Amino acid sequence: MPIDMVFGLVAFAAAMAFTPGPNNIMVTASGVNFGFVRTIPHILGITFGFFVLVSERPLLRIRRCRSR
């Protein structure tokens, strides 16, 4: 991988890791309003939803390749 792509990847990863996204803001607000214990299902739901979103695409691609 060229060094300029590595720098771009590192910059993107740092920006995504350290900036609050919508899920971070929702979980923070939920934690303030309802407490940590009642926010755990929200955190687990976000984690599960992200996993489904990320794993869905490769599975659909595999299915499309097999049908050809």
Image (tube, helix red, strand yellow):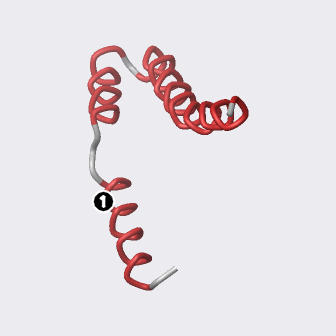
- Image height check: is 5 above or below 36? below
Residue 40: x and y in percent read 50, 21
Residue, far bottom: 3
Which residue is more in the foreground, 24 or 52?
52
Q: Dot 1 surroundings within 10 Å: few (below 14), some, or many (20 or more)?
A: few
Quarter location, residue 7:
bottom left
46 to the left or right of 20: right
Residue, far right: 66
Residue 42: x and y in percent read 44, 19
- Image height check: is 14 above or below 20? below
Q: Residue at x 38, y 19 (%)?
A: 35
Q: Residue at x 61, y 37 (%)?
A: 61
Q: Residue at x 68, y 37 (%)?
A: 62
Quarter location, residue 10:
bottom left
Residue 64: x and y in percent read 63, 32
* Quadrant where the C terminus is found in the figure: top right
Which residue is more in the foreground, 40 or 48?
48
Residue 29: x and y in percent read 26, 25
Q: Residue at x 40, y 61 (%)?
A: 13
Q: In the rendered image, which residue does mark 1 sit on?
A: 15
Residue, far front: 68
Mark 1: secondary structure: helix
Number of numbered discs on residues: 1
- Image height check: is 67 above or below 34? below
1 to the left or right of 36: right
- Image height check: is 27 above or below 61? above
Q: Amino acid at mark 1?
A: Ala
